[in-house]
Amino acid sequence: MSDLFREMAVYLNGHPGMFQTAVRAHMIIFFAVLLTSFLIGAPLGVLNAKKPIFSTIVINIFSALKMIPSLALLLVFLPILGTGFWPAFIALTLHALPTILISAYTGFKEVDVNVLESAAGMGLSAGEILLKVEIPLAMPIIFTGIRTCTIDIIASATLAAYIGAGGLGEFVVMGLSRQDHVVTLIGSLSIGALSLAADFVFFILQKILLRYQSAVT
């Protein structure tokens, strides 16, 4: 085992630029997909929670979309957009959107009606109730969705290497094609470490939000 890690260290020492470029590309894809998914999915989830007329249809559509493998989505957009960042970005965003949307929907639906009535009775406007009560109470559930989505995006972004979008998946693809276990492990362990680091960051943020939730309630 020590020899294996020594070989990995030697390879990384000989290819520092390649590794840094792969990490940077992976992080760009991750942040772009997560931010876009949140900016679209969270408001859509809140809207469906507050205006339930079409919520069943919307939730079912996005739940069905979530069942489509990310690789299949990548292959769908490959002939339309070609290779590179954009087909990977669009496919992974569509794959991540349902998790954010459903978590936002669930978070707002589970806010206690009595709390909302109490807030209204205290004279808070609808906007104040949204900002000071509903969002703080719903955010822990939303953050659970974000944490799930984070690991999913980082793992799925590995497949982006198959369509020329770069990322740490390049090491996995290269290692498998060359049957080089050292290169494959570098990619796999790096993706795993990145997932754990991102999940830990959001875990800390979620704990902070839970404290805020306790203060509100």
Image (cartoon, rainbow, N blue to C red):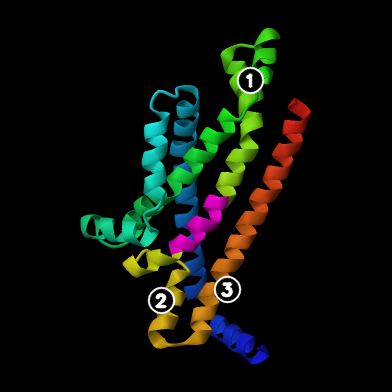
Q: Is residue 153 magenta?
A: yes
Q: CA distance from mark 1 to mark 2?
A: 51 Å
- Let me know if residue 47 is in the magenta part: no
Name the quadrant of the N terminus. Answer: bottom right
The residue that disc 1 covers is 113
Residue 61 visible within the image: yes
Mark 3 and mark 2 residues within 8 Å of each other at the beta carbon: no
Residue 213 or 172: which is nearer the viewer?
A: 213
The picture places residue 90, in percent across and down from the top left corner, at 35, 50
Q: Which mark is residue 189?
A: 3
Q: Residues within 10 Å of mark 3 (few under 14, many from 20)?
A: few
Name the residue at 61% across, 67% down.
193
State the mark number for residue 173. Answer: 2
First of labels 3, 1 by sequence position = 1
Q: State the mark number for residue 187.
A: none
Type of amino acid at the residue the image marks with label 3: Leu
| Mark 3 and mark 2: Cα distance apart in space | 14 Å
Magenta residue span: 148-157
Q: Position of residue 145 (x, y in %)?
A: 56, 45
Amino acid of disc 2: Val
Quadrant where the C terminus sits is top right
Q: Amino acid at mark 1?
A: Val
Toward which corner of the image does residue 139 lie, by quadrant?
Answer: top right
Say what secondary structure mark 1 lies in: helix
Labels 3 and 2: the sequence-earlier one:
2
By secondary structure, the bulk of the magenta-drawn segment is best described as helix
> In this picture, is 56 found above or below 69?
above
- Asked if the residue under mark 2 is in contact with the one under mark 1, i.e. CB atoms within 8 Å, the reply is no
